Amino acid sequence: MSFTGKVIAITGAASGIGLALTNHLASLGASLSLADISSTPLETLTTELRAAGTKVLSTTLDVSSSPAVDAWIASTTSHFGRLDGAANLAGIGMDFTAVADVTDELWERVLAVNLSGTMFCVRAQVRVMQKGASIVNAASMAGVRGRPGLGPYVCAKHGVVGLTRTVAREAGERGVRVNAVAP
Ligand SMILES: NC(=O)c1ccc[n+]([C@@H]2O[C@H](COP(=O)([O-])OP(=O)(O)OC[C@H]3O[C@@H](n4cnc5c(N)ncnc54)[C@H](O)[C@@H]3O)[C@@H](O)[C@H]2O)c1
């Protein structure tokens, strides 16, 4: 398999699944537009990838900001001229908290990053993608079943599943695939 000539956008690229995917796609020859809220590990990763010959555009952003996400995808297409794929992996967990004890602040932050952030990314990406492109979103087993103590996270990930199913049907009409993974 080769990704030479393909441009892939990844959120949450500085850690965990996003970092593993970034390194894997770099090894397959992809050009990468990486985004994360954590600037230092993102900069370190970018330096390493460029030294190894990978074409990288690196952007520090908070996916819960729709203007920041729109600007990131605009700069990606401006820089590389195309967008073939995207993996929306940025997300946050939460301490176990029964719904009865969930504060407004906890609810709003978990929904803002995990659901609104994913929606802002998918919306910006699907607008510029052509036939054959593909988007993968990070859902969770918490996106398909209830988990005591994780109410906001469960609601956000259920939302990611619903968003993915909906955009898959909308964009699938023109050959753009949209899927979610449930680690
Ligand atoms: N690892 C698992 O077992 C597991 C299980 C279920 C779901 N998931 C989901 O998979 C995705 C990746 O998980 P992971 O384990 O790699 O997590 P991780 O914490 O290792 O990485 C998440 C990355 O997202 C970034 N991030 C956090 N908030 C952000 C924001 N507002 N804007 C931009 N970037 C932000 C972090 O800086 C970090 O680099 C998440 O959406 C998570 O909910 C993971």
Image (cartoon, rainbow, N blue to C red):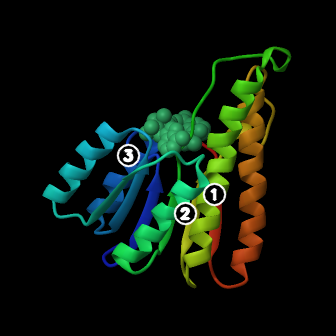
Disc 2 or 1, which lies upstream in sequence?
2
Q: What residue is pinned by disc 2?
A: 70
Total marks in image? 3
Within-10-Å neighbours for mark 1: few <14, some 14–19, many 20+: some
Indicate left or right for 48 with 68 as reference: left
Residue kind at label 1, given as amino acid type? Phe
Residue at point 46%, 74% (across, down): 83
Within-10-Å neighbours for mark 3: few <14, some 14–19, many 20+: many
Beta carbon at label 3 within 8 Å of ligand 1: yes
Q: CA distance from mark 3 to mark 2?
A: 22 Å
Q: Secondary structure at mark 1?
A: helix
Q: What residue is pinned by disc 3?
A: 19
Q: Secondary structure at mark 2?
A: helix
Q: CA distance from mark 1 to mark 3?
A: 21 Å
Residue 105, position in %: x, y? 71, 25
Disc 3 or 2, which lies upstream in sequence?
3
Query: 11 or 176, which is in the foreground?
Result: 11
Q: What residue is pinned by disc 1?
A: 120
Q: In the figure, 36 relative to 6: above or below?
A: above
Please say whether residue 123 is visible from this viewpoint: yes
Mark number displayed over residue 86: none
Disc 1 or 3, which lies upstream in sequence?
3
Residue 174, position in %: x, y? 67, 85
In which quadrant of the rendered view does residue 106 lie? top right
* In this view, the mark in front (2 or 1): 2
Check contact, mark 2 vs mark 1: CB within 8 A.
yes
Query: 147 or 121, which is in the foreground?
Result: 121
Residue 138, position in %: x, y? 60, 49
Indicate left or right for 101 with 81 as reference: right
